[in-house]
Image: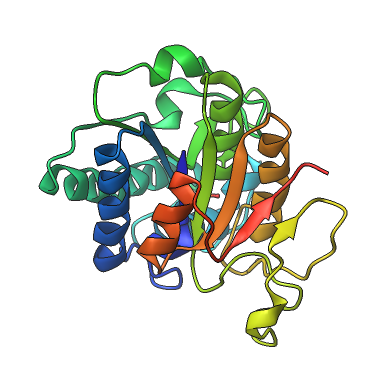
Amino acid sequence: MIKFGGGLITNKSKMCTPDLGIIDQLVGVVVKCLDSGMKVIVVHGAGSFGHLRSKHWRLQEGLIEDIEITPQDDCKSQKMAVSIVRNEMLTLNSIIVEAFSKQGVSSITLPPHKWAKNTGSNFHGEILETFTTDKDVAITFGDVVDCDEGEFGILSGDDLVVRICQDVPNVSRLVFAIKGVDGILRRPPELATSSDLIENWSPSVEFKGVHNKEIDVTGGIGLKAHRGAEVAALGIQVLIVNGEYPDRIYRACTGLPTRGTQIFSE
Ligand code: IP8
């Protein structure tokens, strides 16, 4: 299972801007994995396709009565924002699907707002049934989903990976491909040197991760680390690698040693 970080596949500060070069590179890695006999599930984040508008309309808090938020030219209410963000995520997904099809790979897209309800890794949804496919790759992504409380909320790709690893049998490895850092660092990235990479991380190890609250409505690297530890507890190898280096991602996917952080449950 591979998670394409939203910050990696988009320009995070500019509304709805994909990084087509990186997307092609990541798809190339998945193709190499398929060619070497692996089966791959792809989960992707939202980046500037989901976080900026969700942040503006506070979608992560659910429906807010009498909300006072500056309307946008193309969006006047939280409910409108829900449907726009869902469409923006479908647009980002279609760019990824297109990149796969250009490289000869068939895929099925599984938008969470169509099959999942509630947020957090124990969200409601039939994983096994949903993910059974004869296509080369199944793809899903962080999305705005319906919720029992508050009508809607944000289901992060980082929550999806946990449940998929729990419910799909025989997942051997989970790789998070992220932007701008080689893994979990001991110090904030702007202060860190190459020796600050934590090669083996478990929840007892402290670190100063960045979570850009101005942009992100979900959890940044801290959420990945803790969700990763939940997955590692299932006996699945979990790695965080710098997504700008295709060779590192490929080595991580095949279980070969590479620069990055391996996550352990304890
Ligand atoms: O980027 C967030 O998913 P993530 C989904 O995987 C939206 O945390 C719509 C903001």
Residue 199 point in image, percent of width and height: 68, 63
Which residue is pictured at 46% across the width and 38% down the height? 1
Which residue is pictured at 82% across the width and 51% down the height? 203
The single residue placed furthest to the right in the displayed view is 204
Residue 253 point in image, percent of width and height: 45, 47
Report the colour scheme.
rainbow
Q: Is residue 14 above or below residue 106?
A: below
Q: Is residue 64 visible?
A: no
Q: Is residue 203 left or right of residue 236?
A: right
The single residue placed furthest to the front in the displayed view is 256
Q: Is residue 243 left or right of residue 29?
A: right
Residue 16 point in image, percent of width and height: 34, 62
Which residue is pictured at 67% across the width and 26% down the height? 122
Residue 183 point in image, percent of width and height: 61, 65
| Residue 256 or residue 152, whichever sits in front | 256
Which residue is pictured at 38% across the width and 62% down the height? 247
Q: Is residue 110 visible?
A: yes
| Residue 50 or residue 194, whichever sits in front | 194
The single residue placed furthest to the top in the displayed view is 129
| Residue 214 or residue 27, whichever sits in front | 27
- In the picture, residue 101 is in which quadrant? top left
- Count of labels shown? 0
> In the picture, which quadrant includes the C terminus?
top right
